[in-house]
Image (spheres, rainbow, N blue to C red):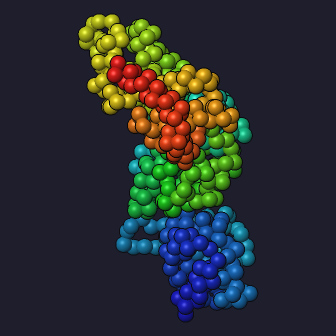
Amino acid sequence: MHVETWEKCLLFIRERIPAQSFSTWFEPIQPVRLHNEVLTIQVPSQFFYEWLEENYVHLLKQAIKSQIGENGRLEYSVVVDRGNDSVQPTTVSVSGGSNNHNKNRVNGYDAYKNPDFYRELKNNSNLNSSYRFDNFIEGDCNRLARSAGFAVAQKPGITSFNPLMFYGGVGLGKTHLVQAIGNEIISADNTKKIIYVASEKFTNQFIDALRNNNLQDFINYYKEVDVLILDDVQFLREKEKTQEIFFHIFNHLHQGGKQIIMTSDCAPKDLKGLQERLVSRFKWGLTADVQAPDFETRMAIIQTKMQADGISIPDEVVEYIAYTVDTNIRELEGVVISLIAHASLAKTQIDLELAKQILKNIVTDIDSEVGIDYIQKTVSDYFKVELEDLKAKTRKKEIVIARQVAMYFSKDYTNHSLKSIGYHFGGRDHSTVIHAVQSVNDMIDTNAKFRFAIDELKKKLKIRTAVA
Ligand code: ADP
Ligand code: MG
């Protein structure tokens, strides 16, 4: 009887919510009994029960009403036992009419906290003290992100930048920046509870918690933080259940005025595979992009890192590296570290020749590759347009042509992806790059003067390729 009633309730519910939510939150429920118009259902955990009450209480009431009638009531039986054979579910009664479950918290709640789980999480903010603001170099590419991050670090949870979300390609400093925020907050007030966690780790912790039946600990742990830093949220794509949990934690923290900071490898609107309601939450605060470092920033990064190691190198070498390594900061760092290692071994001053030799061995395809920056500079010189205009929105004909030509060479002469090329041209779409390449090919076919220009440019770019 109770099984049948519950199945009818399920039919009622199934029609009204997304399939994913249904299978997450309703399939695991077991009907226990139906007695005096009270239907008792068993749910796997305290958290599960709270979640149902928070999100589906009205739907459940409707379902009960439709199957049992006006006086129908629902009672939860919450499993709090952790894996023993003698499962003795503690029961909490929640009537269909009242919403007093907070007064009626499940007994024995403390008993099933898992000390190991807590210990692992508790002493571990996962902050790495080498990522700080004072060694984060500011440039046009990261100015907005840095200043928003700094503001949040001064007043976590209080600014309107909540959540704060940084996005951009790999190796551009997102992790450095969010860690710097965490370190800054801790240094001002070490009672603040901060957790930095990579989304992958978060997902694994969640899965472990499910498996070990301590989902509640997991949830509570994250609900207690003052600042939650979730790195690389793109990793949550297609992970529906992890998203549900994060959504729940997110709402709790946000409502409590706690700071949430996230990073992603793409803009929120491109986070396909993430629930819409989650993505729309991300947009509540501030979203700032971190772009590939421009030439000046690359120069500054090389100089600073060299100085930090007490090594000085001639400007032309710094310039050469900055021109050649234009993909991301991680790669740039790798090159600088290699140079430093060589310099200290050889005990010689690093000159241009040595730098070229070293780079040849560590930067793949350097022989055939010129950097996008160099292409942009060569092309803008040739067409006598401003370098900056190549990255700007300007639609003036001569600039559009120069921009397309520079994109065309970037596609041909570098290993950058279409997406990355678009990035280097003022954050344009990969389809814009495809279009540029097609236009240039068309013009080469139809316009002799243009063809000549392309040949000239090829020579200029090739000379440098041979020298490098
Ligand atoms: P992401 O998380 O975007 O992939 P990271 O934060 O891991 O990038 O940065 C890659 C490396 O480059 C790190 O070692 C970081 O310290 C360094 N780095 C990135 N941006 C900067 C910057 N603006 N100033 C100094 N170092 C930086
Ligand atoms: Mg990162």
Total tally of numbered discs in the picture: 0
Viewer can see residue 100: yes
Q: Is 91 positioned to the left or the right of 310 in the image?
A: right
Task: Tell me where residue 248 appears, x and y as whole percent.
Answer: 60, 57
Q: Residue furthest bottom?
A: 1
Task: Tell me where residue 74 appears, x and y as whole percent.
Answer: 64, 79
Q: In percent of the image, x 47 and y 51: which residue is there?
A: 235
Front residue of this view, candidates 366 and 41: 366
Q: Residue furthest left?
A: 346
Task: Tell me where residue 351 appears, x and y as whole percent.
Answer: 35, 9
In the rendered image of this protein, does residue 382 appear above or below residue 43? above
Front residue of this view, candidates 62 and 168: 168
Q: In percent of the image, x 74 and y 87: which residue is there?
A: 70
Front residue of this view, candidates 135 and 435: 435
In the rendered image of this protein, does residue 274 appear above or below residue 75? above
In the rendered image of this protein, does residue 70 appear above or below residue 22? below
Viewer can see residue 42: no
Quadrant position of residue 211? bottom left
Q: Quadrant of the N terminus?
A: bottom right
Q: Residue furthest front?
A: 448
Q: Quadrant of the C terminus?
A: top left
Q: In percent of the image, x 70 and y 68: which residue is there?
A: 100
Front residue of this view, candidates 154 and 272: 272
Q: Is 370 positioned to the left or the right of 188 in the image?
A: left
Quadrant position of residue 393? top right
Q: In percent of the image, x 70 and y 74: which residue is there?
A: 58
In the rendered image of this protein, does residue 211 appear above or below residue 265? below
